[in-house]
Amino acid sequence: MTRWILLALLATPAVRADDWPHWMGPKRDNVWREDGIVERFPAGGPKKAWSFPIAGGYAGPAVAAGKVFITDYLTKDKVEEGNWDLKEMTGVERVFCVEAETGKEVWKYEYPVKYKISYPAGPRCTPAVDGDKVYTLGAMGDLICLDIPTGKAVWKKQLKDEYKAKVAIWGYAAHPLIDGDKLITLAGGDGSHIVALDKTTGKELWRSQSAVESDDVGYAPPSIIEFAGKRQLLMAGPKALKSLNPETGELYWSQKYTADNGSIIMTPVLTGDFLYVGGWKNKNLLVKLEKDKPAASTEWKDKKDLGIGALNVQPMLDGSTMYGFDHDGLLMACELPSGKRLWETDAVVGAAKNSDTAFMVKNGDRYFFFTERGDLVIAKLSPEKYEEIDRAKAIIEPTGVAFGRKVVWSAPAFAGKKMIVRNDKELVSFDLAK
């Protein structure tokens, strides 16, 4: 066994504690566990370490083993705000690997793709690094496994075509989950709402549930909890919150949930025996899990003044308090499992507008917020209040447009005592070391 572990470590680059290898960081919990991070910003804001030119997209970067991975969409067509009539666009999705210290390009992989989605700036999903492979999911369902040393494709699947799926209006946006030897992802289609693939070969291991219409698919990334002695794969979909056996796809339980416009985006938050999920226009659900078997029952749902209607940003639980941005752009504190709102503020982004966004990570006893206006904010959160410590304004230009305003809607990565973030022009590394 010792020899096998040693050979495995020699064969694949290790994921260090200061890496950010996939969506929401090493443990998919938006906690940045590095020490030696600035208490306040230097005059003029954090120092830019490097920048790398890219094109459009919402996908955040992944950082692992001294490399940064980012995807974009290069097109000559006009990127229209909203694109609600789903006008077709022609271009190429690209995957870049760059050096984390210098921003120098290591390799590029690209492929043609036509978009017929709303908000067509580019891909949505953060790459996922696992050993010497990186996995990317494009906006129209191009799922690709790339070899990190060479940048060559190991395997690829077109989910929309293979599963005869109807693409959701905002495209494929649920970040795939690596679980042991499996890659688990939403696919869509009849009997294949969610699928598990062999991460080495791309071979299908199982498929489960159905999402026949585009509004059936949703955007919530799959997640796994361990409860009642079982590992449970959670699916927050537009019509139900479900628990599956991650090894087989077998349905454990299902509780009804209705998402307006198919807009269920957050993964469920677990606190004690309870799971919470919420979305657009106060569509929310709290279920209670049974302790002796994988089963659940609904405690309350669709309460106007309870919970948080999370959209673009995953809420975070700190003790029994959940913090997150409601659909109207307000940062809220909410007690769970009661759902009682403790306070709300528009201080992070500014005067609240429709779907205002600030991505949040926890570092020690503080939170870092990267706002859609390009500000970086340090603050403390408690059940009593929001307390701002410092703010660096417009460290990166908002290049996108949403609801008539300029935005940057991409989650940063935090690794190597740096924040790495993108807009539709560049990928930038900022130094946040003391």
Image (cartoon, grey):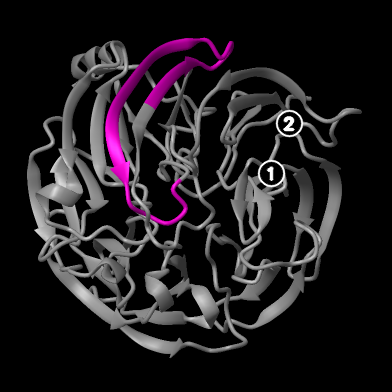
Say which residue appears at 23% left-offset and 13% top-offset: 7
- Examine the rendered structure and indicate whether residue 361 appears above or below residue 3: below
Residue 106: image quadrant is top left
Which residue is under mark 2?
A: 37
Q: Is residue 271 left or right of residue 359?
A: left
Give 123 or 69, whichever is nearer the viewer.
123
Tell me if mark 1 has few (under 14), some (14-19) or many (20+) residues whose alpha carbon lies within 10 angstroms of its own.
Answer: few
Residue 364 has which mark? 1
Which residue type does callout 2 highlight? Answer: Ile
Q: Earlier in the sequence, mark 2 or mark 1?
A: 2
Say which residue appears at 56% left-offset and 43% top-offset: 411
**Viewer-side label of 2, 1:** 2
**Residue 147 sits inside the magenta stretch:** no
Q: Position of residue 149 (x, y in %)?
A: 31, 11
- Examine the rendered structure and indicate whether residue 128 appears above or below residue 365: above
The residue tagged with tag 1: helix, strand or loop?
loop
Tell me if mark 2 has few (under 14), some (14-19) or many (20+) residues whose alpha carbon lies within 10 angstroms of its own.
Answer: some
Q: Where's the C terminus, which quadrant?
A: top right
How far is mark 2 from mark 1, CA to CA?
10 Å
Residue at the far right: name it: 43
Which residue type does callout 1 highlight? Answer: Gly
Q: Position of residue 33 (x, y in %)?
A: 59, 37
The number of callouts visible is 2
**Chain part drawn in magenta:** 95-120
Secondary structure mainly formed by the magenta segment: strand
Say which residue appears at 20% left-offset and 14% top-offset: 3
Whether tag 2 and tag 1 are in contact, CB under 8 A, the answer is yes
Residue 244: image quadrant is bottom left
Q: Position of residue 403 (x, y in %)?
A: 62, 61
Q: Is residue 29 left or right of residue 177?
A: right
